[in-house]
Image (cartoon, rainbow, N blue to C red):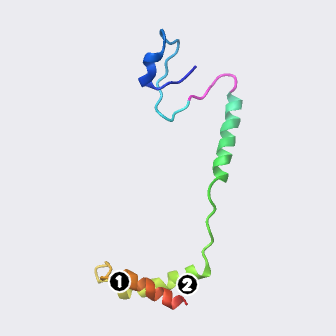
């Protein structure tokens, strides 16, 4: 069995013995006598996917200090309605960095 895109169906000589419509990216899984083989491959693929996830980097001491300092400085540079004052975010970042040094 060969899966080809629908727009290339005109290339088939004669009438096919079996016709299956699939979308792009879909695959056909056999369900005959070799189901165990397919299940092994699926398990291997699942194991590969879980190990390929990138590990999260640990937050540094400076990042923790900066987060705390920014939270304390932030309210001074914001308006009452919760939006930033003009140049407020940049000023808050600078002030938080100054506090962390």
Q: What mark, if any, has residue 65 been given in the picture? A: 2
Q: Quadrant location of the C terminus?
A: bottom right
Residue 88 picture location, percent across and down: 35, 83
Q: Quadrant of residue 55?
A: bottom right
Is residue 68 shown above or below 44? below
Circle 1 — which element? helix
Q: Residues within 10 Å of mark 2 (few under 14, many from 20)?
A: some
Magenta region, residue range: 28-34
User: Mark 1 against mark 2, which lies toward the viewer?
Assistant: 1
Q: Quadrant of residue 100?
A: bottom right
Say left or right for 33 vs 70.
right
Circle 2 — which element? helix
Q: Which residue is mark 1?
A: 88
Is residue 30 shown above or below 81? above
Residue nearer the viewer, 14 or 81: 14
Q: Is residue 70 magenta?
A: no
Residue 28 picture location, percent across and down: 56, 28
Q: Residue at x 62, y 26 (%)?
A: 30
């Amino acid at each position: 069995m060969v899966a080809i895109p629908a727009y290339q169906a005109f290339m088939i000589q004669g009438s096919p013995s079996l016709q299956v419509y699939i979308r792009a990216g879909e695959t056909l899984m056999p369900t005959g006598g070799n189901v165990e083989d397919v299940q092994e491959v699926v398990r291997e693929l699942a194991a590969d996917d879980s190990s390929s996830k990138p590990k999260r980097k640990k937050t540094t001491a400076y990042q923790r200090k900066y987060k705390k300092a920014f939270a304390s400085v932030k309210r001074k540079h914001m308006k009452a309605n919760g939006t930033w004052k003009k140049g407020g975010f940049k000023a808050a970042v600078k002030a938080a960095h100054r506090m962390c040094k």
